[in-house]
Amino acid sequence: MLTENINLYIQQPVQIDMSSYPNILTPPSSSEDSPQSTLYNSPPSCYGIQDSAYILPQTSLAFDFDGATQATAPYLRIVEQPIDRFRFRYKSEMTGTHGSLCGQTSDRSRKQTYPTIELCNFNKRALVRCSIYQHNTKEDHRPHAHRLIKKQGKGEVDDPHDAYVTPEEGYTYVFHSMGIIHTAKKNLVPELIRKKGQLKKEEIARLEGKVRDLTQKEEIEIKGLAESESKSINLNVVCLRFDAFYETNGILLPICPPVYSHSINNLKSALTGELKIVRMDHCTSPAKGGREIFILVERVTKKNIKVKFYELDDEDNIVWEDYGKFSDLDVHHQYAIVFKTPPYKDLTIKSPVKVFIELERPSDRARSEAKEFTYTVSSNIYKPGSKRARPSYDSSSYDTSLASDELPVPINNLCLENSPTGLLDDVQLEVTSAELQQAMRNINSDEFQRIFNDFGQDYSLATDAPNEFKKSVIKSRVVTSTKTSNFRSAKSRPYCQRSDSIEETAMAKQAVLELQNFIKTHPSDEKAVNMLCHYLKEDNKTNALHVSIRQNELMDVMFLLKMIYVWKQHELLNVRSDLYETPLHIATYLNSEEIVANLIVCKASVCVGDSEMNTPLHVAVISNASIAIFEKLFSSEDKTFVDMENNEGNTALNIAIENGNLKALKLLCLNGADINKQHKKNGYTPLRFAIEKQNVDIVKYILQHKDLQALVEDFQDINPLQAAINKDNSELVDVITQYMKQNNYVNVEIKNEVEDYSDDDFEEKFSIKLEQISSEELREMYTNVKNFTPACLDDISQILDQSGTWQNLADLLDLGHLMRSGLCDSKNSPTKLLLKLAIETNGDSVLQIRDFLENLDETQAVEIIDNMVRTQFM
């Protein structure tokens, strides 16, 4: 076949069968010689995809050009594959600077790579070529109607792109500065005719030994092929084809079979584009699920997207997975999804569980980058703005743990007045000084020692002194501590807006008094532990310690803390009230430095969260606590709490920035807060939050941090410096600009993307423009349209029949089985039959079909339907 004619142009015969070489060849190049090539090494996985029919025997004599014999057959090897997702741009978008088609191993943190080809087993000057082709699994690869352009000087040239390779260059060439232009549907046939015509001319030159124009018959054949192929071409997937040629007498002779890259998908197509979660309004959910979450995403299709939750074990194996619940109506204009979280596998978790969330596209099993998500403890806890009944603290409230015969006689026979004043007068404590001194030996805290020295004598005196003296000592101590303590009134606190009722105050005094009398009986350790747990252990219920701290009853607090410490019941310090606050939360908010210090000494946890998972450190920032409070919290042995997140995904550092609390920000940074930690909702770093708040002082401080990584990108691939440059704040812009100059940062401007529907052929579809109607008015009109007009049905059927998109539409309408069953007769219009069944049998509305076509990028069909609706109401 071709080999018979090759002999006309080379002196020696070619010892290889090229009959399997495809008849459709690559068109001649309109570009000039390309610049010097660069070699990039690549793993074996980057080898070209070759059809078995094109692989040549590697042991035969292949070519003898000018007397130079090759021992083995030449072949092409793809050293660097192109990236698998790239934005196909419309012609109208090609203004300004746009990214080039990079190599698969490109990384933003290092030098970019580009598609690279190597010609092996050849030792003469050769020409290598890159062109754009349809990606098929079959052997008949065909040219694609899209254009592969390459920058050349100030202009751009179309594919194919040719370059010469020599032994000096290692027969390797790098195809850089290329981009893909999306050809409008109305131009598919002309573009295919152009490319196929060039291919035919090249083929004729090889067969006849000369270059000539095409005959009329050949042109008609090419036009028929182009029209046929345009109906089934996939506009969202392409691949690169690489050829190698030997030039003789101005004619290019193929050296070896071509190779094809893997598929390149249109990044902005809902059917093939990259899946990405851009933003979430919540990053946590109760374990029982059901939380409604809004997420912003890159373009998706309603019936071809899922939201997946999963958990990994230590070896990265999936141990649990489930999907968010939503309907087609919950996917808003392809860019937002509203869903409800699935329940976690264990509804009774006792602590937060980290899982992951990602988007999944069933059609091609594509997945987005996973984002962290947290399941929290499910509980009927207080929620801000809701009302809850106050607990009743009657005598039966504390009868669930110990039977009456187990209680010491002084407590069992105790009769108390209902007045808080009476309770205060009867407070007693029997703990000998020797016992307290013994307990103190195990407490390594100057603060605790000072408190003990201040109050220890009073406790001892209260045991043996006459009643009147006890009253005066206690009252004077309470008055003094109230006046001298740096105490914030609970009535003014926004953190948990409540004050203790008379019943709660009475309950607290009663519990303290009973414990004091219980101590007089010199109980065993077991009974003492049971008694403490009886009064203080029940979670989600306000106890005596909570009330005593809120009321700043320092003596009662110290008594309870000493009992807890002596009998090593440290977990009682983490019991949460009915508002889900631990004693440390309350003391921190009230700015009670002494109580906070002693809670830390007694091993209260700084990691326990409240109903919103705010730790005491969050509370300290919210309440603008004193430096002493922060120092006490940071003195805890557990340092993991510094970067803990609440239910909104905020760390204490985030809240400090939000509140403009520079003091807290500095303390947090000095104590190891992660200055580069990304928010789970949007990927913002602390620097980005400060820039969004436009707080110049905080921005300046963060920019001075030694560990700052200023270019960490958010979920939209925008880094803080890019965001800052676009702010309308001259002082902030000056600060950022100066920082960029000092650190040699350049090219951080944000590229403004053009809308996906800016194609010029979309703008020219109709020369007669109907009166402009808002989208809301148009959708209202659709409610009164029950079917397509005959003219509209004919027009959109012709469009969908030619493009083949009716098959995708059938799947979206849940009528895909029609296509597979053969019910859609190809002799007639399958689209007409599909639309009639959808409306008359399936009950689908014209608006639903219109929206599905919009998802499928059938903009011309959508415009025709919209115009049909408009004209019916004009």
Image (cartoon, rainbow, N blue to C red):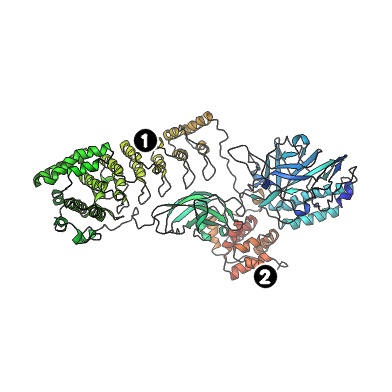
Quadrant of residue 837 in the image? bottom right
Residue 757: image location, x then y, percent: 61, 50
Q: Amino acid at mark 2?
A: Leu
Residue 302 visible within the image:
yes
Secondary structure category for the residue under label 2? loop
Left or right position of 126 against 810: right
Q: Is residue 292 left or right of residue 359?
A: left
The local crowd at label 1, few if under 14, some if 14 to 19, many if 20 or more residues have their Cα within 10 Å, is: some
Seen from the viewer's position, the closer of residues 695 and 605 is 605
- State the separation of the CA atoms marked 1 and 2: 73 Å
Of the 4 image quadrants, the one containing the C terminus is: bottom right
x%, y% of residue 440?
24, 41
Task: Say few, some or many: other residues with alpha carbon within 10 Å of mark 2 (under 14 / 14 to 19 / 20 or more).
Answer: few
Say whether disc 1 or disc 2 marks the residue closer to the N-terminus.
1
According to the picture, the residue beneath numbered tag 2 turns out to be 823
Looking at the picture, tell me which residue is in the foreground, 632 or 379.
632
**Residue 624: percent from the left, percent from the top?**
33, 40
Q: Specify whether residue 774 is in view.
A: no
Q: Is residue 783 above or below residue 175?
A: below
Say which mark, if any, is on residue 663: 1
